Amino acid sequence: MVAFLTALVVTIAMTGGAMAYGMRRPVGAPLTWGEAMAASAYVFMVLFLIYGVVPHQWLQWADSQLGWRKDKILAGPEVVKNKTISFDIPMTITYETIRDAIAAGIYIVALGAQMALFAVWQNRGKSKPKEIPTSAFGRPLVKAEPPKVEANA
């Protein structure tokens, strides 16, 4: 449990640090070769942690300390022997299935967070366009500017 939580906390802290630095850095500032290499190594480490170490540590914790194995059954036809109180379900759900679903969930959440953070990074420093008032029919309520006439001297 300690290794899983440590990997998760370090990943979140590194991601937060990168985003805090990105909000402070001027948009469009040139990068040196060394800065680019350091940034790429940093991002690689964060991705390695979230896609490699965190799911591995979850699976290790679930296998060893929690004991979520194939032989530990959560629900299924053989769980309840008294048929008057319960009903049979036509499948067996083991704790290993739940363990693997949580591991897949870690990947899914990480991919969604990665796409969202990349979008935030790419759009930092951009201002939103001002809203144009619209009519009840959805058409913009702006006057067309008259064409500019250039004076020939």
Image: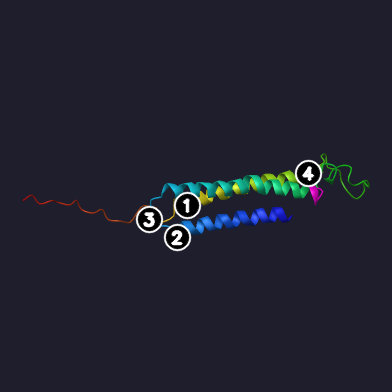
Give the mark nearer the N terminus: 3 vs 1: 1
Give the mark nearer the N terminus: 3 vs 2: 2
Measured in 3D between alpha carbons, the distance from the residue under mark 4 to the one under mark 2, in whole angstroms, is 44 Å
Give the mark nearer the N terminus: 1 vs 4: 4
Measured in 3D between alpha carbons, the distance from the residue under mark 1 to the one under mark 2, in whole angstroms, is 12 Å
- Amino acid type at image mark 2: Arg
Q: Pointer 1 and pointer 4: residues touching (CB < 8 Å)?
A: no
Give the mark nearer the N terminus: 4 vs 3: 4
- Amino acid type at image mark 1: Trp
Give the side of residue 136 with respect to residue 65, left or right.
Answer: left
Residue 65 in the magenta stretch? The answer is yes
Residue 111 visible in this rendered orientation of the protein: no
Q: Which residue is mark 3?
A: 129
Which region is colored magenta? 63-67
Q: Which mark is residue 96?
A: 4
Q: Which residue is mark 1?
A: 121
Give the side of residue 120 with respect to residue 28, left or right.
Answer: right
Tell me what residue is drawn at x 44 percent, y 55 percent.
124
Q: Secondary structure at mark 4?
A: helix
Q: Secondary structure at mark 3?
A: loop
Q: Pointer 4 and pointer 2: residues touching (CB < 8 Å)?
A: no
- Report the quarter where the N terminus lies: bottom right
Residue 77 visible in this rendered orientation of the protein: yes
Give the mark nearer the N terminus: 4 vs 2: 2
Q: Between 114 and 88, which is closer to the camera in this rendering?
A: 114
Tell me the mark number nearer the camera, choosing from 1 and 2. 2
Mark 3, residues whose alpha carbon is within 10 Å: few (<14), some, or many (≥20)? few
Q: Which mark is residue 24?
A: 2
